Image (spheres, helix red, strand yellow):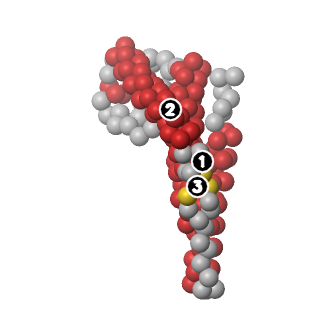
Amino acid sequence: MRDRDWALPLRILVGMAFSAIVILTISQIFFRFVLDSPLIWSEELVRLLVVWMTFIGAAVICWDGRHLSVDVVFVRLPGKVRRALRIFNCTVALGFLSILVWYSIPLVGLTMNVSIGAMDLPEATYRAPATIGGGLMIVFIVLRIWLRWPTDGPVSADSENDSVM
């Protein structure tokens, strides 16, 4: 259970979204400049996929513990200080994400009946990634703490045990 990749389905989704973005962008170029008939909806769909990919990808990164960090000082700290810093880091992240999710839920509800854009999708489709991605980030941070909490042994800049986040 500790070695299971809980984020694998999301990795696949992010990969599919990225592939769709590339295909749609190339198709848009072809239709616009070769066929002189642009796909009106493609730019909007690409933008939507980028937003979803960003928030879902951030959740995957939370599971991996690979968020961008400057660990020059962190790897040189004593084990107990590193542990306290990890706890502080997780607490701040979970607090911020909880606020994000809590306040984005009503916003998604308010925009459910408002259609926008060429694809005539509810505006909530553009607001939901923050709510869903934030919730997934919370779940993965908690799972990471529970299943993968690092030891206070030696660490390196490339080690998976550098941080819980």
Q: Quadrant of residue 118?
A: bottom right
Residue located beneath label 1 in the image: 113
Q: Quadrant of the N terminus?
A: top right
Residue located beneath label 2 in the image: 101
Mark in front: 3 vs 2 = 3
Q: Where is residue 98 in the image (x, y as percent from the top left)?
A: 47, 27
N-term mark: 3 or 2: 2
Tell me the residue at 50%/32% (across/down): 101
The alpha-carbon separation of the residues under discs 3 and 1 comes to: 6 Å
Q: Do the residues labelled 3 and 1 touch (CB within 8 Å)?
A: yes
Q: Please say whether residue 110 is visible from this viewpoint.
A: yes
Q: Where is residue 60 in the image (x, y as percent from the top left)?
A: 57, 38
Q: Which amino acid does label 3 sit on?
A: Ser
Nearer to us in this view, 69 or 91: 91
Disc sitting over residue 115 in the figure: 3
Q: How crowded is mark 1: few (under 14 residues within 10 Å), some or many (20 or more)?
A: few
